[in-house]
Image (cartoon, rainbow, N blue to C red):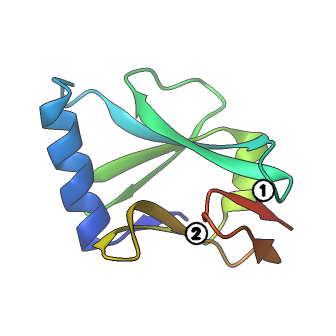
């Protein structure tokens, strides 16, 4: 399961509207090689659900994850921070053994 906080939900809904995306555009979360810790998160809107995708829904937000990425993301919570120490989406990933300072890459 992948979940979203209320702040993340609100920001996703605002971004979808600001970018002119339809309700058919869901959030796709994936993991790719790279970043200073070896793996990095990729987040974006996608209006296609692939046959091999896992689909989670939390607080009315559909989250699409490919099977390979799911291994790294089980139990992750997507949050959004707009505080003084940074602004953006944050991944609270119980599978990560370490993360970089920017929070965009991790290692398992």
Q: Which residue is mark 1?
A: 71
Q: Determine crowd level at label 1: few under 14, some 14-19, many 20+ residues with C-alpha closer than 10 A.
A: few
Q: In the drawing, does residue 43 fall left or right of residue 95? A: left
Label 1: state its secondary structure.
helix
Do residues under tags 1 and 2 come within 8 Å of each other at their CB atoms?
A: no
> Of the residues under marks 1 and 2, which one precedes in the sequence?
1
> Along the line of sight, which residue is nearer the eye, 42 or 34?
34
Q: Residue at x 70, y 52 (%)?
A: 70
Q: In the drawing, does residue 27 fall left or right of residue 61? A: right
Q: Looking at the figure, which quarter contains the C terminus? A: bottom right
Q: Position of residue 102 (x, y in %)?
A: 60, 63
Quarter where residue 31 is shown = top right
Q: In the drawing, does residue 73 fall left or right of residue 36? A: left
Q: Which residue is mark 2?
A: 76
Q: Residue at x 26, y 63 (%)?
A: 59
Q: Position of residue 89 (x, y in %)?
A: 42, 59
- Work out whether residue 107 can be spotted: yes
Quarter where residue 36 is shown = bottom right
Q: Residue at x 21, y 25 (%)?
A: 21
Q: Looking at the figure, which quarter contains the N terminus? A: bottom right
Q: Determine crowd level at label 2: few under 14, some 14-19, many 20+ residues with C-alpha closer than 10 A.
A: some
Above or below 61: residue 100 = below
Q: In the drawing, does residue 15 fall left or right of residue 45? A: left
Label 2: state its secondary structure.
loop
Q: Residue at x 14, y 33 (%)?
A: 18
């Amino acid at each position: 399961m992948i979940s979203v906080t209320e702040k993340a939900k609100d920001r996703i809904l605002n971004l979808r509207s600001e970018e002119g995306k339809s309700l058919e555009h869901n959030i796709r979360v994936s993991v790719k090689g790279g970043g200073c810790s070896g793996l990095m998160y990729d987040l974006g809107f996608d209006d296609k659900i692939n046959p091999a995708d896992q689909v989670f829904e939390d607080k009315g937000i559909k989250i699409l994850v490919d099977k390979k990425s799911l291994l790294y993301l089980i139990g992750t919570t997507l949050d959004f921070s707009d505080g003084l120490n940074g602004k953006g989406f944050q991944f609270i990933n119980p599978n990560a053994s370490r993360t970089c300072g920017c929070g965009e890459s991790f290692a398992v």
